[in-house]
Amino acid sequence: MREIKTAVITGASGMIGMALAQLLLSQGIKVAVCARPGSSRAERLCVLQGLYKVWADLDELKDNRVFEEIYKKIGNVDAFFHFGWAGTFGEARNQMFLQSKNIQYTLDAVSLAKKLGCQVFLGAGSQAEYGRVQEGKKLRADTPVFPENGYGMAKLAAGQMSRIYCQELGIDHIWMRILSIYGPWDTEKTMVMSAITAWLQKGSPSFSKGGQLWDYLYVKDAARAFFLAARQGIDGKVYPLGSGQARPLKEYIKIIRDNTNPLAELGIGKLPYNQNQVMYLCADIEELTKDTGFVPEYTFEKGIQETVAWQIESAKLDR
């Protein structure tokens, strides 16, 4: 088991980064985060007491200034968590030159991890690396990959190239292929958070028939999985990250409605399925559980209750 006393997180103002930083701080771990200067989301980092902040864009990770600032704040680093990524939504996913830059940023992050003396580098992969998979088959590390957009292609290349680079530098490498995560600090663009916001504001969100079988994992569980992988994950492994259980999307939608505006219309069936809609998505977490002991602690219902409470409180603070 690796002893983790210090850690660096890139992309820390994202949902998983925030939850992970909070978890690591609660364990008495010194945490430095790299955040993009001028980012509207970076303001949220101020709610985490004891966090060391280094203002740096992704293309600055290679700069000696970033290394010096991190080292001055926390010294040698045990674990490096790389969540930083440009172009995660919409049309940006197919901006090939932008996505290709993310591969370089990932390798720059590995170089920085080496300078800081890291034992282990953990990268945030994606279900997009798989592309279209056979329905009813859980996603495993050895599931064939054929990504269908630039984002998935870049994630796949970044994972494979950073693994080889880590081998050359003598750093353990773990790649987490993340499925659908939800919870506090989520972006409004996701199905879960957009539905929560709409129903809390007495709106009427619309959905497809909701027959897709989907795997959702609460963000606190996702953060704990990353932490356990940093301590006990096997060097060179890829771990799909989800709850390991799939349910029809319409069940998730009903749970969200019941915890926000129970008398509201569900809105199911008002929209057609997307073109080439993926109808089944579920992570096989058997290897992750075997190697690290990770088992999700939150049901979807419990996670949604916490997320709704957080969203209500956040709305009060924004007034």
Image: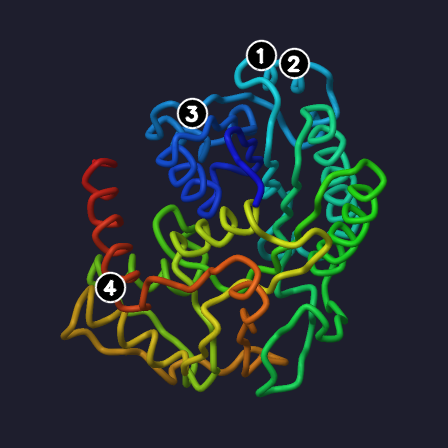
- What residue is disc 2 on? 68
Query: Residue at label 3?
Result: 51
In the foreground, 199 or 146? 146
The disc label shown at residue 224, or none? none
Q: In which quarter of the image is residue 277?
A: bottom right
- The three-letter code of the residue at mark 1 reads Lys
| Tag 1 near tag 2, CB within 8 Å | yes
Q: In this view, does 232 lie to the left or right of 308?
A: right
Looking at the picture, which amino acid does disc 4 mark? Answer: Trp
301 left or right of 269? left
Q: Do the residues labelled 3 and 4 touch (CB within 8 Å)?
A: no
- The location of residue 85, given as percent across then percent down, is 63, 44
Identified by mark 2, the residue type is Glu
Q: Give the mark nearest the N terminus, 1 or 3.
A: 3
Q: Which of labels 4 and 1 is toward the front?
A: 1
User: Would you name the residue on which mark 4 appears?
Assistant: 199
Task: Look at the numbered discs 1 and 3 and tell me whether their residues touch, using CB distance below 8 Å.
Answer: no
- Foreground mark, 3 or 4, reads 3
